[in-house]
Each structure stands twice: as C-alpha cells, then as structure tokens.
Amino acid sequence: MRRSPDQRDDDHLLREGARRFLEERCSWTPAPPAPAALDALRREMAELGWFAMGLPESLGGVGADALQGLSIVEEAGRVLLRRSLAADVLVAPRLMRRGLDALAALAPGLAAGEVRFALVPEDPAAGGLSVARTAAGGRLQGRSALALDADTATHWLVQAGGRSPNGAALVCLEAVGPAVDARRLIDGRTGAVLSFEGIELPAGAVLATGHDALALFAEIEDCAAACLVADAYGALAAGLDLTVGYLNQRRQFGQTLGSFQAVQHLMADAFCDLETLRSLLLWVAAALESEPGERRRAASAAKVALGRQGLAAASRLIQASGGIAMTEDYRVGHVYKRLQVAAGLHGGTEAQIRQLATDTLSPKGRPDDEASAA
C-alpha cells in the first residue's frame, strides 16, 4: 500500500516505540504475569495513547488508520503478550467512528485504559444468540462461542442473531450478569464462553439491528481476522529471529548448525512462508479502508495463509531447533501454540477457504476453466 513520506516516518516511529516499550516492560517469560501486572501494563499503554489513536478527533483521538493499529498488534505478538489488543486498538475505535452514541460514550474510558472490550461471537452450533424485544428494551438469550479475554473485559461487544437480518443485533453490554465459563488456552491466554439466560438489556445497549448489524458483524470479523494475522506474524517473525540466532551458535561436528545446507533450506522455506503472510497482512490492512467485498476477500486470504503457511513455518522452526523447542522454557513452542489458537478463532482455515471461494468464484464457474476451454 502506498504511504506518503510523512506517513512512513510516523509508521516507523510508532513501530519502534511500541517494540522498545514491549520488549522492556513485558518481554516473554515462561511463567504468565500476574493479572495486576497486566492491568498496570495496560495503564501504561493508555498513557502512550495506543487506545486513543484510532479514535476520531471528535472523541479525542488522532484518527490512525488500520495499518498503524495493526502494527501495535503485531508488536504485541512479538512478545507473545497474554492479552489481546484487537478489540481496544482496532475494532472498538472503528465502531465509535460510526456514530454509535452509546458506544462513543465509552471513548474516554477506553482512552484512559479503564474500559476493556472483548469481542463475543455467537456459536451457531449451540443455537446462537438472540435478542427478544421487550417493553423495557430487549432480552439476550443463548450461548456464545469462545471469546478472547472475555473473563477480564469490562464490556462485551456481542453479535446476536447473525443468521438473519430479522434477528440480527449488535449489543454492547457491561461485563456482569451471565454465567462465565473461563478457560485457559494452550498458548497461555484466557478466554471464556458466555451463557446469557434471559439477560435484560439496558437502554442503549443495542447498537444496531437488521442489515446494519450484519454489516457491522462482517466488519468486526474482518478486523478480528486481520488482528489475528498481525499478532501471528509478529510472533512468527520473533520466532524466526530466535531460531536463526540459535542455529548460528549451536555447533555440531565442528560446525554451526546454520552452515548445513538442509537447515538453510528449512529456514529459507520458513522465511518465504513468513513473507507470504506479511504480503497478505499489508493487503488486508489496505482493504480494511476499502469496500466490504475487498475487505472480506483480503481477510479470508490472510486467515487461510495463517492456518497453512504460518503453521508450516512454525513447524519448521521447531524442527530446526530440535527437542528444546517443545520445552515450556523455550519460546518457539509457544509461538506454534499461539498460531494454532489464532488459526481456530473467528473462522477456522477450512471455513475461510469456503468463504473465499464463495466471494471469489461465480456459481457458474470461471469462464476460462478446463470445461469451457474444451
């Protein structure tokens, strides 16, 4: 994507500042930090302006674009930060630009680090979520899919009734009331499945309904997919750097492991997979500012690459590192786990392939396929 010289300078300063801060304040360790330490770290992030930068100027932000928001998420992935920044750095600020008054009222709290959002998708296999209209406003019913950091958020952005515009509703709900089934994921992060048993919704909790809600659902899912890819790319890039350093130090038969041709080929393949992921990440960053069809195709393609090339590259890092890579004290194995979790959230690889085929191919087939040629 094309950037002006001023934009490139801003991008460079933002990325370098974020990397330096994260490496100094929360470099990766095998033992998870205490929740209080993560809360204190979040307040420091707020002081740096990370949560306000995506907000429009009318809400006290600077209107940063998607690429700048994704660069923060990417740097968080490099240190395997154990809380997701997707909802607060990218998704919520974008929604606040849409003129959703009830959500915009939370902008000062978000900028100050006091408000923490979690994205709560519905689980169609469990019957999904529904909002029933009542005299007081509405009642939320059903069971969600796994939501990252839902157990530590102050507010949930809930997608309900996504199978039909008749029942679709985007809800912003304070994180109190429903049963929270908290779970520790294999990569060390936490998530939760929420059960809403007829939760009465306060006035203003329903942000959008019908086709407007479905359009916002699609934007949320595409932004969430982009953030997962950015986080995975950062984790994988740091893992590759670590592995190359290891191979240039570890010696076998009087030579460094990195001098063997087979190992060099393995690392070259991992590097190519990493660059494929980076190219698609740049595409999706540009497409987030484009029309919905382009955005959807870019997000699906990037998510497919994460589940295929990304995991293949992480596997190669483990293979090159040997048995040490699978110990709890070495980061590369945790990179692989991080990518496994990312590949399964907000639409797995096979689901994204089907979505990409639906969005790209005509139901009648391509005009230049073999049957037409014959």
Image (cartoon, rainbow, N blue to C red):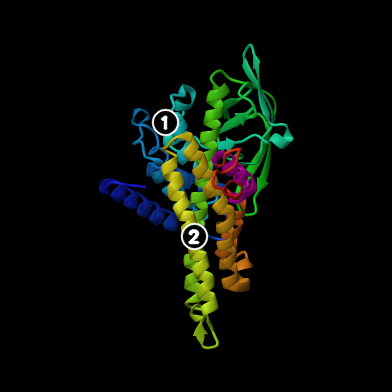
Magenta-drawn stretch contains 7: no
31 over 107 or under it: above or below: below
Instruction: Report the residue that reaches farthest toward the front.
Output: 374
Is 287 displayed left or right of 332 in the figure? left
Q: Position of residue 310 (x, y in %)?
A: 55, 57
* Magenta span: 342-360
Most foreground residue, 44 or 77: 77
Amino acid marked by disc 1: Pro
52 over 171 or under it: above or below: below
* Contact? badges 2 and 1 (CB < 8 Å): no
Q: Which residue is mark 1?
A: 108
Residue 36, visible in the rendered structure: no
SS class, disc 2:
helix
Q: Position of residue 176 (x, y in %)?
A: 62, 30
Which dot marks residue 369? none
Q: CA distance from mark 2 to mark 1?
A: 37 Å
Instruction: Report the residue that reaches farthest toward the bottom.
Output: 254
Amino acid marked by disc 2: Leu
Residue 204, visible in the rendered structure: yes
Instruction: Report the residue that reaches farthest toward the right.
Output: 126
Q: Hey, which quadrant is residue 133 in on the image?
A: top right
Q: Which residue is mark 2?
A: 274
122 over 354 or under it: above or below: above
Magenta-drawn stretch contains 350: yes
Q: Hey, which quadrant is residue 20 in on the image?
A: bottom left
Q: Position of residue 349 (x, y in %)?
A: 62, 49
